[in-house]
Image: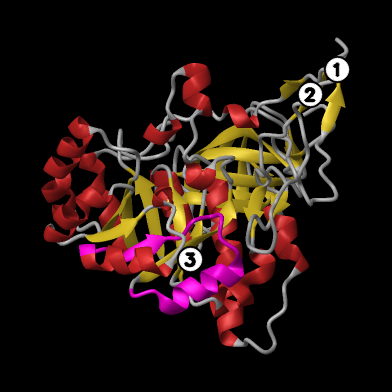
Amino acid sequence: MVELLAPAGNFISLRAVLENGADAVYFGLDDYNMRANAKNFSLEDLAEVSKIAKEYGAKTYLCTNIILNERRSRELEGNLEEISSCEIDGLILSDIGLIEDTVAHGLEAHISVQENVTNSYTLRTLKKLGAKRAILSRELSLREISEIAEKSPIETEVFIHGAICMAISGRCFLSYGLYGRSANCGDCLQPCRKNWTLTYEEGDDNVINFSDVEDESFIITASDDGSYRTNFFSPKDMCMIEHIPELIRSGVDSFKIEGRARSPDYGAMVTGIYREAIDEYNEDPAGYKVKDSWMEELTSVFNRGFDTNFYFNTPFETSEDNQSKYIKRDIGQVVNYYNKVKAAEIRIWDDLKIGDKIIFQGRTTGSLTHVIESMQIEGKPVSNVEKGSKVAIAIPTKVRENDFIYKLVERTCDD
C-alpha cells in the first residue's frame, strides 16, 4: 500500500499531520536541510519527534538534503550516531557520498529530489551503494514515472502536492545571485515569487520564439508608472488530488506532500484530504469518485493556484502569490478545557459569532479546525461576542491551555 508522507516544520505541524493520517513524516535538522527559514528541529528534539511519531505508528525521515561542503559533510557524519540513537528511520540525502555511513549507522538512505533521478539506471546504481529509496525528479511525466517504478530495484517516491520550484529539481541560483542567500544551502528567499517589472525594447531581433506552445501568455499587470509587472518566474502549486487512481497504479511507493515552511493548518488540511482519497480508492477502486469538496477545501488554505506540473504536460502558466479564499486572523487563546462538558474557555481579541470557522493550534493539539455552533458567557447562550471577552465554546475534541486560536476570514479584493 502506498505511503502518505507529510511535512513537519515544527512540533505543532508534526502533531497536525499525524492526527490527519500521515503514514510517515519528514522534517529538517537545523543547518542541514532545504528549509532554513522554517523553525526546524535540533538534534536534542529528535528523540521526542521519534516518540510522538511512534504513538501513531508513523515513520520518520530526517532531511539533510542541502549541498554539503567539506565542513558540513564532516559535521553531519559526526552526528549520525546520535541521530540513529533517537530511532529515526531514515535520512533524506542529496549527497550520495554519505549513503554508506548512513546505512552503517542503521538508518535508511533516501535520495533527495535534488539528485534529479530520472531513470532506472541511476536507481540500480543507488541500490548498489545501499540506498533504500529515491525521490524521483519533478520534471518526469506520469508515463515516465510508471516505467521507472516498474523497473526500479528500490523504493520510489514522488511529490503530489505543494510548491514547485522554477529550477530543475530545485537547484536554483537566483536567490544567491540577488541576495547572496543560497537556495542550494536551504536559505532561499524566493525571489521568483515576487512581482517583477517587465521591459521590452522595440526592434530587439535577438529574441526569437521557437516554442510550439500556442498559448504563451503571462499574467501581466499595467502599473501607474507605465511599466508592466508579472509573476512569470513563479509556477502554480502542484495538486494531484484528482488523479489518485493513476498515481497509485503507477507503482510508486510513497506520495509526498511539500510544505515544511507552511502552517500547521495547511499540513492538517492537505494531509487529511489525501488520506481520505487514498483510503476511499483502496476500499473500492471500481466505485471511486473524486469529491468536489476536496478541491474546495484545498483552495481554502494557502496556494498559488493549482497545476498538475509535468505529470500530463509541460506547465507554463504562472501564478500570483496566494490564491486561497480565506486569510487567517489571530483572534485568541485557550484559557482552559473542561473535559466533562466538552467545552473550551477562550480569551479573544477579535469579535466572534456562531458559524465562524476557527482553528486551534498547539504543540499537543496540532491543528484543529472547528465551526462554532454553541457559545456561552457565564452560563448563558450567546450568538455574538465582542473582542476583549472570555467565552466558552462547545468543542468535542480536547484543546489545551495556551493553544492559539485563528479565525478564517473570507478574502476581499484588498487582501
Badge 2 amino acid: Arg
What x and y, as percent, mark residue 133? 34, 65
Q: Is residue 405 above or below residue 14?
A: above
Q: Is mark 2 on a helix, strand or loop?
A: strand
Q: Which mark is residue 223?
A: 1
Quarter of the picture containing the N terminus is bottom left
Q: Residue 229 carries which label?
A: 2
In the image, taking residue 108 as reference, residue 357 lies left or right, namely right
Are discs 3 and 1 less than 8 Å apart at CB? Answer: no
Q: Residue at x 37, y 62 (%)?
A: 134
Q: What stretch is highlighted in magenta?
A: 129-153
Q: Nearer the viewer, residue 167 or 101?
A: 167
Q: Residue 40 appears in which quarter of the rendering?
A: top left
Quarter of the picture containing the C terminus is top right
Residue 55 shows in this picture: no
Q: Which mark is residue 21?
A: 3
Q: In this view, does 289 lie above or below 72?
A: below
Q: Which of 413 and 130 is in front in this view?
A: 130
In the image, taking residue 363 as reference, residue 91 lies left or right, namely left
Sequence-first disc among 3 and 2: 3
What x and y, as percent, mark residue 179? 49, 18
Sequence-first disc among 1 and 2: 1
What x and y, as percent, mark residue 144? 55, 69
* Mark 3 → mark 2, Cα distance in angstroms: 41 Å
